[in-house]
Image (tube, helix red, strand yellow):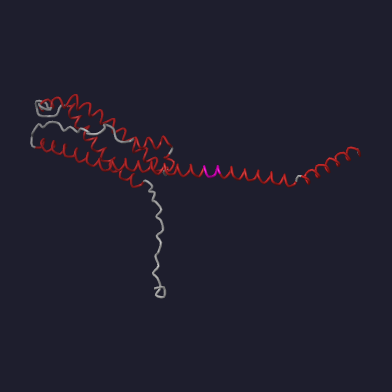
Amino acid sequence: MRDYRGTVGQRVQHLRGWIERHRELIGRFTFELIIIFVGVTAAFALENARQNREEARYRVQMVSALRTSLDDWAVHGKEIERHIDALLHDYDLARQRGLQPTLPVYRESGGERPPTRAWDGIVATGAARALDPTLFFRLSRFHGRADSLGDRYIRYNDFSEQRVLPYTSGPETFYTEHGQLKPEYAAYLDRLRDLQREHRALVIEAAQLRDALPRHRRKSRPTSIRRRPSPAAR
């Protein structure tokens, strides 16, 4: 037992001696290891900060694109609304005079579907995380209604092309012998009025959502104040 303790003590003394002889080398190695660790940690932190800045900048750009899309709804939508109002007003006025006018037909000059791709892109890229949950739900509901409106317009436009536009030269096609609209054409006219009401509601909601989107302002640089020279300096 004493021999074992003596052997262990000798080894400990030998280790202490080796550490004393190589203390400077061990210190330099430890210092370099700490420098490497700090450098790698700092590099990861800087890269993470850079990625966060790029992601924040991308989110701002996507929200800006969404605001542009909603603004198009609010502006172009009012033009569509005025056009449909004029068509229905002229038709109703002619009917009040006892005439049998050609059915009002609204034709979208652009795409048949509303511009909802910006919202799809925001959801697909995860940029919607920058939005308030309540606002996110309102935007999802709005674009769902917009897609539904697009489907309804396509069905309306198909009927226009197949059952209305080919017979505009003879309006009597749309009326019975007693001067009343045939059921299928009365339903067609009601479909246009439904599109008008739904479109008007979406235009109002688009303007509200556009104004509710977060706005990111650029930080202005501080302006330097130019001091006037003192009378003594003059």
Residue extending farthest to the left is 98
Q: Locate residue 25 relative to residue 59 in the image: left or right.
A: right
Give x and y (percent) for residue 149.
28, 33
Quadrant in the picture for residue 94: top left
Q: Nearer the viewer, residue 10 or 194?
A: 10
Residue 184 drawn in magenta: no
Give x and y (percent) for residue 169.
10, 27
Region of the chain picked out in magenta, as a range: 43-47
Q: Residue at x 42, y 36 (%)?
A: 125
- Quarter of the image containing the C terminus? bottom left
Q: Locate residue 41 relative to residue 26 in the image: left or right.
A: left
Residue 46 drawn in magenta: yes
Residue extending farthest to the right is 2
Q: Nearer the viewer, residue 192 or 13?
A: 13
Instruction: Answer above or below: position of 98 versus 38.
Output: above
Quadrant in the picture for residue 162: top left
